[in-house]
Amino acid sequence: MSNKNNKIYLDYAATTPVDKEVLKAMMPYFSDKFGNASSVHSFGQEAIAAIDQAREKIAELLNCNFNEIIFTGSATEANNLAIQGIARNFQFSISNFQTNLKSQSSNSKLHIISTNIEHESVYEPLKELEKAGHEITYLKVDKNGFINVSNLEKSIKNNTVLVSVIYANNEIGTIQPIKEISRLLEKINKKRRENGLSKIYFHTDAVQAFQFLECRPDWLKVDLMTFSGHKIYGPKGIGALYIRQIGPMGLIGPIISGGGQEFGLRSGTENVPSIIGLAKAVELVFKNKEARFKKVLNLRNQLLNYIIKDNKSINLNGSIENRLPNNLNIRFPNVSNETLLVALDQKEVAVSAGSACSARASKASFVLTALGLTEKQAKESIRITLGKDTVGEEIKKVAEIINKALLDLKNYKGKIVTP
Ligand code: PLP
């Protein structure tokens, strides 16, 4: 059951509760084991040993090196670090004549390829780079929510330094062909090497994908990968960036400077309890991934069927194929999502109008308009996301509550149309 108070929470893409096992692992590090990991004495040693163990655990599960995992204050920060960090490093290299990028292009303008359905924490740093004079290509998704890899290939230029593609979208759950992209980049990078051009790095925001999909970087063949604690039953305020170790200079430069923690890439006293919590949450994901996937997929499909049975006019936004198993994004024609959300909240059902970041602003979702929906249609859409503890009883109840709310709204407005 999602909640003891009979409330039903179906907004797990926004955040998840901390797992009891995670909380238990974290607890000692708030008070008993409170040392600063940079201190030389035994309190500090205890803290750094715990951080090392957590990093080792995550590295082992992701099949990567210990020093390829950088803890950050959120996935937002990890995405910023990936994008701004790589841009900084390239610019630094250009200004020091340490790459041949200067000869590749007449100026130091970098080119980055991304998509038009990235999370704001990728989109906004890209906008910043654009303002600073760099060039960004935003690949458009089709009406089902997928990018076209051959369009990506066509967008590559000599000064392309990074491709950043979200693994699974936070609003519609569509899964991008990350493996296909990395295979393409491998082929292209081989040619670039032969022609003396620098490598194009590949970043993916795996925040929503992490608990359900294969996320080992050596399998995905990505250079940078972002994940977050609070989307996987870990604490809020902790994220991580996987950074492939390349060359003595490293792949990226820091965006936060100070005491040089996290291999110099993220200064600031380490958040020990949250790092421990993240490692435990990752461990539980790896232990339960398949079972969680099957369970939520089954319940999600049941819910969709229940809703469709009584509402033939609804539309599912984004493809049902290649979609996260816990995600539904449904448009109820002529019903404002704000009105429906409030009606459902009054019946103690929590769903969302879109991504948590934009949920408070009554703006149309840019992800939905990217699929071709009008602003009005986007504002008729709600996101329902299931969690590992969602049960069948709740699904049935939610379907009934939604159907009843729609009937009530219909009576009130009297203008729901059935195509
Ligand atoms: N990327 C995606 C796809 C997300 O869904 C989110 C959170 O909504 C983030 C990044 C940001 O994560 P955090 O809340 O840890 O900053």
Image (tube, rainbow, N blue to C red):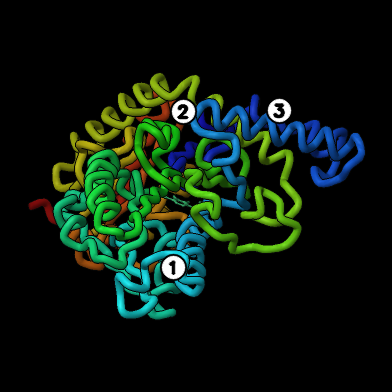
Question: Of 70 and 403, which appears nearest the observer?
Answer: 70
Residue 176 seen from this side: no
**Residue at the far left in the pictured view:** 419
Image point (53%, 39%), residue name = 16
> Within 10 Å of the Cα at label 2, are there few (<14), some (14-19), or many (20+) other Cα atoms?
many
Against 244, residue 369 (above or below) is: below
**Residue at the far right in the pictured view:** 41
Question: What separation in Å lies between label 3 and label 2 (alpha carbons)?
Answer: 20 Å
Nearer-N-terminus badge (2/1): 1
- Where residue 387 appears, as percent x and y from the top left, is 45, 33
The residue indicated by pointer 2 is 388
Q: Which-is-in-front pick, marks 2 and 1?
A: 1
- Indicate the quadrant where residue 306 lies: top left
- Where residue 356 appears, as percent x and y from the top left, is 46, 55
- Indicate the quadrant where residue 109 lies: bottom left
Tell me if 204 is positioned left or right of 138 in this view: right
Q: Secondary structure at mark 2?
A: loop
The kind of residue on which mark 1 rests is: Glu
Q: Is mark 3 within 8 Å of ligand 1?
A: no
Q: Secondary structure at mark 3?
A: helix
The residue indicated by pointer 1 is 124
Question: Of 356 and 88, which appears nearest the observer?
Answer: 88
The residue indicated by pointer 3 is 25
Q: Which-is-in-front pick, marks 3 and 2?
A: 3
